[in-house]
Amino acid sequence: MYQEEIILASASPRRRELFALFKLPYRCVSTDINENQLPDENPIDYVTRLALQKGEAINAENLVLSADTIVVCEGEVLGKPTKDNEAREMLRRMRGKSHSVLTALALRQKSTGLLLQDVCHTQVLMRSYSDAEIESYIQSGDYRDKAGGYAIQHKAFHPVAAVQGCYANVMGLPLCNLTCLLQHAGIAVEVDIPQACQQHLGITCEVYPQILASCMPVSQANRWDSR
């Protein structure tokens, strides 16, 4: 098993929870970067840039994993609401509609020049929750530090009606895409990640065979599509 400590460039408890399923040695280091979207920057370029910059902010010889997740509704990136009114507006806007969740991954090691990247895209349909349910969820405070102002896994609110794509991606860390990156970096993944993910999250996943078969990380110098 891989013995060197991997640095997870994130303070997110959800990413920490999901990455722990790999049973690889790691430690978390939070980063502080400017997360403002640049003028005319499209969502894929935006989320990719943030993931890369988070990793670049870590000055270490270890392998560094960084990620960023965004919600795109009707062509607009919805960030992390900091106030109740912002969360309320986002949840009302997404109610009964589909939106996209994009997570960009970057796996790099400065000492070797390794850089692998990927983007995972999930389509999410929100259910027609009531205003009272929105208020109850906002009062719980769970919306904070979450792109789009919601957590797919919140059992009381359960805002999502259907998911097309990777469920873990909506939580912030697409595990099968990450499996591909780790394997391309020469790290053996000894855990059955699809099984571990489904068991841990209590879901049934039908897309993992396609993801494991098709995700092809590319270097920083190249472009990729969102599949």
Image (cartoon, grey):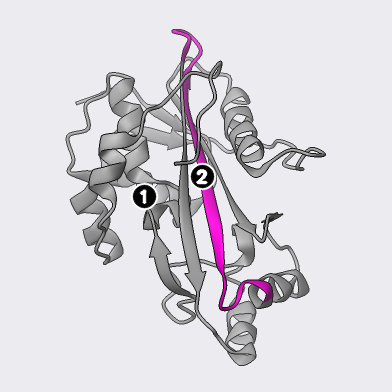
**Foreground pick, 43 / 195:** 43
Residue at 33 percent across and 20 percent down: it is 185
Q: Position of residue 151 (x, y in %)?
A: 51, 66
Q: Mark number for residue 43?
A: none
Q: Tell me the amino acid under the disc marked 1.
A: Leu
Q: Position of residue 199 (x, y in %)?
A: 21, 60
- For the record, the magenta segment spans 93-114
Q: Position of residue 208 (x, y in %)?
A: 27, 48
Furthest residue toward top: 112
Q: Quadrant of residue 203?
A: bottom left
Callout 1 crowding tier (Cα within 10 Å): few <14, some 14–19, many ≥20: some
Q: Quadrant of the C terminus?
A: top left
Residue at 79 percent across and 38 percent down: it is 38
Q: Position of residue 29 (x, y in %)?
A: 53, 35
One can see residue 144 in this view: no
Q: Tell me the amino acid under the disc marked 2.
A: Thr
Residue 100 magenta:
yes
Q: Is residue 107 above or below residue 191?
A: above
One can see residue 138 in this view: yes
Task: Indicate left or right for 80 with 214 as reference.
Answer: right
Q: Quadrant of residue 139?
A: bottom right
Say which residue label 2 marks: 103
Residue at 17 percent across and 34 percent down: it is 190
Say which residue label 1 marks: 18
Q: Quadrant of residue 211?
A: top left
